[in-house]
Amino acid sequence: MSLVYFIAIPILASFLTPFYKNYLRFVSVLVNILLAGFAAFFYSRLPLNEFISLDSPLSIIFILDYVSFFFVSLFIGVMLFFSLYSIKEKNNTAVFVVTNIFTSGALGLILSADIFNIYIFFEIASISAYILTGLNRDKVAYSGAIKYMIVGAVASIFLLLGIMLMYLNLGYLTLSSIGAGFHTMDKGIQYLVLLSLFIGFGIKTEILPLNFWVADIYQATPTKIAALFSAVLSKAYLFVFFHILYTLKVDAPALLFLTAIGLLSFAVAELSALRSKDVKRIFAYSTLGQLGVLFLALSSANVVVVSGALFLILVHSISKLMLFFSLDLVEKKMHSTRVEAFAGFRSAFLFTIFAIGFLSLLGIPPFAGFIAKLTILKGFASMGAYGIVGAILAISLVEATYFFRLLSANQRSKKTAEIKVPLLQKIMLSLLALAILYLGLFPQGLLDFCTDAAQTLIQGVIHV
């Protein structure tokens, strides 16, 4: 059994499309079930290192440890729910072809332990995202896809520059070897490498000041595809960025800078959401805000804070998957994602789903978001970082304002359309909501695993 299967199976499922194109929606479900089975098989064998022998320095190394297993399992689960949600779309085979490639790129990013192959999967995930953005095939979609492609090309250039500098100065591409030799490089080169990585991954992790493009892309993207960008893509880039930083053992001032960037990004995103008049843009800015929290938490190098951040990554992915799927149903009925359209639908079920998602993201008990944010705040408090604790709480009030404003707008307005949720979608949304409630009431098992994953992340890639 090989880790390569995580990458090869989704790719093969896409390339063999002509043989079963009428059944691709079922094949996508089976692919994700198969990947979930592989993840379960490997769990008892963690950690795993796998080498694919090629001429040095282009050796390929995959590592499945506690933290990479966390992300692999999360992404497979998200993609399984997405393929089930879309299973009735008989004629839209492009969605299944591209999302299989998207899955392969995201999993490759997580598993790779050599910087060049990280770049390869960086490009695979990015190209599939550009295509997914343009799936609506209208002027707005094509404009968004082109804008995304241009911004993504800039990110790729800076990432490639960082890789080139490391290779020219160290002669290695494996993360463990780069980490061992990074601090022997000239200080100026070190800073240039870190700046290149920050710009390259900063664009993709949607962090200030490099996230000016994000809301427009979410607006142009089909609503259910935006769920994948929020739940999977941004998290994959975020993990790889900090995986590299901790392997390089960057110094405290660099991490403090990233903490400040994360806090500022959180504040600006939440204030932007407060002013928005479109629910999809509000959800996009909300994602940017949560990414800001994750950025400052992952910069802490504190096991408790980082474990809380990992818990929040899972909770946020579940919540945003649920919210974007629900908004997709609203959009299909109301033909709009404007706040006015959100206020005009009638569905007790969808209103409940939105309420659960909002309350969890706000960190209100008994939902899972409360446990995630409480763990982060407790960790910062144990570090004596009371200013960060106060800032997170204060900015969260802005988030509460626009979420409660959306809910109250729906309750106060005169309903113009009743939405009947199909049975399959109702079951899936209910399962996601129950997962949020269950993790809020019984979080300890996941928290223990997140602690192990946090320790693995902070120690970086050890020499293999």
Image (cartoon, rainbow, N blue to C red):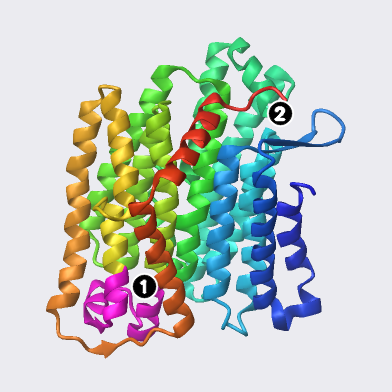
Q: Is residue 296 visible?
A: yes
Specify the quadrant that holds the C terminus: top right
Contact, mark 2 vs mark 1 (Cβ under 8 Å): no
Q: Decide: few, some or many residues near mark 2? Use Cα within 10 Å; few <14, some 14-19, many ≥20.
A: many
Q: Secondary structure at mark 2?
A: loop
| 52 on left or right of 300 | right
In which quadrant of the rendered view does residue 17 lie?
bottom right
- The structure residue drawn at horizontal position 53% and vertical position 61%, both measured from the top left corner, is 78
Q: Main secondary structure of the magenta part?
A: helix
**Is residue 312 rendered magenta in the image?**
no
Secondary structure, mark 1, is helix
Q: Which residue is mark 2?
A: 174
Span highlighted in magenta in the image: 325-353
Tell me the amino acid under the disc marked 2: Thr
Q: Position of residue 424 (x, y in %)?
A: 49, 80
Q: Is residue 216 visible?
A: no
Residue at point 35% right, 79% down?
330
The first of marks 2 and 1 along the sequence is 2
Disc on res. 199: none
Q: Is residue 252 above or below residue 241?
A: above
| 2, 290: nearer the viewer | 2
Report crowding for label 1: few under 14, some 14 to 19, many 20 or more residues within 10 A (C-alpha): many
Left or right: 66 with respect to 277? right
**Up/down of 278 relative to 162, above or below:** below
The residue depicted at 30 percent of the width and 68 percent of the height is: 354
Cα separation, mark 2 vs mark 1, equals 42 Å
Residue 327 numbered mark, or none? 1
* Residue plotted at (58% across, 79% down): 87
Question: What percent of the width, then of the height, locates residue 369?
Answer: 32, 51
Residue type indicated by callout 1: Leu
Any magenta on residue 341? Answer: yes
